[in-house]
Amino acid sequence: MRVSAFLLSLAATATVAASITSCAGPSAPVQNAKTAPEETINLSAAGEFSKDDTAAIVYDRKLAPQGAQASVTVESSGGQTRTSLVVEGLRPRRTYGAHLHAKPCGTDPEAAGPHYQHHPGQIDPVSEVWLDFTTNEEGQGRSAARNDWALERAKLPGSLVIHSKATKKSGPQVGTAGDRVACLTLK
């Protein structure tokens, strides 16, 4: 698994934007364990997307060509969760959707389960992490989100999924973003 200097430097210096957005999908399982108020939870994943490594797996080689890679960090503390995503090697000048999902990646695109929801069943900007991005002429892009809630240790997101389209912001399909293109398993 190769992670370029570009991804590492952007991940290290990414500024978290104050954006909260929504995603769709069935709710994640409800669990009651809470994170201690002073506890910090850090999750991350990085890698080059391949067909057989579920830590960084590709489902659509046309939208995530050979060499495409990404890095995601999630930090939760002090009642806030900040998420940063950096991508490289995707299709140039294209908008993708990206969301945290409830389960780890698998060889089946549906293995990552539904979108992670902090408030199960609630599909709105308060409950979910939405990280749409548009790549530049070199296929690089980044996104960040801040949510006003802390992760619960017993109910952590399992992955970040990149989708084929921008997330729908309204209407009956609000929160949907097309097919799953690639996935990073969070650790």
Image (spheres, rainbow, N blue to C red):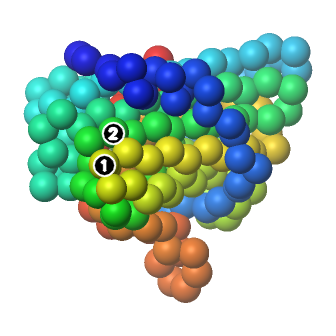
Image location (x, y in percent) of residue 2? 25, 18
Comparing 52 with 158, the one in front is: 52
**In the rendered image, the vertical position of residue 39 relative to residue 164, given as above or below:** above
Q: Is residue 63 at least partly visible in the picture?
A: yes
Image location (x, y in percent) of residue 154? 63, 23
Residue 138 is tagged as 1
Q: Amino acid at mark 1?
A: Glu
Image location (x, y in percent) of residue 169? 57, 75
Q: Seen in the image, is 82 located left or right of residue 111?
A: right
Q: Residues within 10 Å of mark 2 (few under 14, many from 20)?
A: many
Q: Seen in the image, is 88 located left or right of residue 41?
A: left
**In the rendered image, the vertical position of residue 115 relative to residue 106, given as above or below:** below
Image location (x, y in percent) of residue 78? 87, 26
Comparing 10 with 46, the one in front is: 10
Comparing 81 with 16, the one in front is: 16
Residue at 12% x, 27% y is: 52
Q: Quadrant of the N terminus?
A: top left
Residue at 47% x, 56% y is: 133
Q: Residues within 10 Å of mark 1 (few under 14, many from 20)?
A: few
Q: Is residue 34 at least partly visible in the picture?
A: no
- The local secondary structure at tag 2 comes to strand
- The local secondary structure at tag 1 comes to loop
Residue at 33% x, 22% y is: 4
**In the rendered image, the vertical position of residue 175 relative to residue 31, given as above or below:** below
Residue 98 is tagged as none
Q: Amino acid at mark 2?
A: Glu
Q: What is the quadrant of residue 183 in the picture? A: top left
Q: Which residue is mark 2?
A: 88
Q: What is the quadrant of residue 166 in the picture? A: bottom left
